[in-house]
Amino acid sequence: MKGFKNLFAVISLMAIFLLAACGNTEEKPATKDENATKKEDTSYTVEHAMGTTTLEKTPKKVVILTNEGTEALLALGIKPVGAVQSWLGDPWYDHIKEDMDGVEVVGVESEVNLEKIATLKPDLIIGNKLRQEAVYSQLSAIAPTVFSETLRGDWKENFKLYAKALNLEEKGNDVLSDFDNHVADLKEKLGDKVNQEVSVVRFMAGKSRIYYTDSFSGIIFDQVGLKRASQQAELFTPDNKLGNLAIEVGKEVIPKMDGDILFYFTYAPNGDQAALDTAKEWTNDPLWKNLNAVKNGKAYEVSDATWNTAGGVLAANIMLDDLEKIMLEK
């Protein structure tokens, strides 16, 4: 009987240990790294300008086919394996060239190199319907492809799409929040100075334009709260081929370029002499010299790259810094 009791005690003790072991089988909360890994390995679907694209996992090798898209990737901490050449620079804008070291050039926005893209074996291609609609099917045959709709001033909408395609929506929201905070900080510093009318002019080879509300700079001016030169509204009629982006003008329209502050820039890729000559000719014209902004020392030459062609979040932040220096005369 005594032996039986001892056996019973041993069995009871073993049962307690087994129950304790079972009780410890609950899953521990996943670490941040484990959650990130799970997210990377989960397929997801992206709706975009050309339809719907499913990615089996978070992409690692990305080819980007727009200038503003390149800035979006860099802001999200992603170096592309391939990108279209910057509109200005050899081959990249000055403000991104260090971050783009080693990135392969895959043509320009209006003419991408399909063979080059294929050799890079990307697992995601990001492009734009306005620029590359004709080759969407060929791109999709190379890798999952996501297209933004257009390329006007509202870069934020495209940025959100790119962040989603990269499975980095949370980080993308942080980048946009930082930009909005930058805007709010500038507005506070400017105070009553936002109650001024601004005008934006661009010189190109043999032609000149007034840029307006749907442009890259125009969207930023609106968010900052700066008003547009009131006399320019009548120029942007429904039949203007560029809508509210810009309008091409002759010298007789120079008087309408006036404003409390005038910003101008020149698109001169590779030092294009024709563009530089256009800028020189117009800014030496008596009508230009008679503008109040010019006479009051409020006409400022700024960078075409960061105020217009780059078109992304990095350039947007640089433009805000430029505005602070200029308008607060730092």
Image (cartoon, helix red, strand yellow):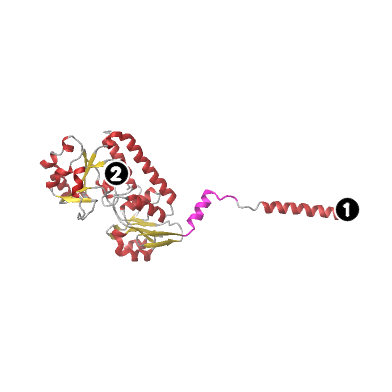
Quadrant into which the C terminus falls: top left
Q: Does residue 102 appear in the picture of this structure?
A: no
Does 30 appear in magenta? yes
| Label 1 environment density (alpha carbons within 10 Å; few <14, some 14–19, many ≥20) | few
Mark before the other along the chain sequence, 2 or 1: 1
Q: Position of residue 324 (x, y in %)?
A: 30, 37
Tell which tag, 2 or 1, sits nearer the viewer: 2
Q: Which residue is denoted by mark 1 in the rendering?
A: 2
* Cα distance in 3D space between marks 2 and 1: 92 Å
Q: What is the magenta range?
A: 28-43
Q: Position of residue 208 (x, y in %)?
A: 17, 49
| Label 2 environment density (alpha carbons within 10 Å; few <14, some 14–19, many ≥20) | few
Amino acid bearing label 2: Asp
Assign a secondary structure to mark 2. helix
- Residue found 32% across the figure and 45% down from its top: 316
- Residue found 31% across the figure and 64% down from its top: 135
Q: Position of residue 326 (x, y in %)?
A: 26, 36
Q: How many marks?
A: 2
- As drawn, 134 above or below 164: below
Q: Depth check: 137 or 129 in front?
A: 129
Assign a secondary structure to mark 1. helix
- As drawn, 115 above or below 232: below
| 20 relative to 64 in the view: left or right | right
Q: Which mark is residue 113?
A: none
Q: Position of residue 10 (x, y in %)?
A: 80, 53
Amino acid bearing label 1: Lys
Q: Which residue is denoted by mark 2 in the rendering?
A: 222
Does 238 appear in magenta? no
- Residue found 89% across the figure and 55% down from its top: 1
| 129 relative to 3 in the view: left or right | left
Q: State the residue lying farthest toward the left.
A: 286
Q: State the residue lying farthest toward the right.
A: 1
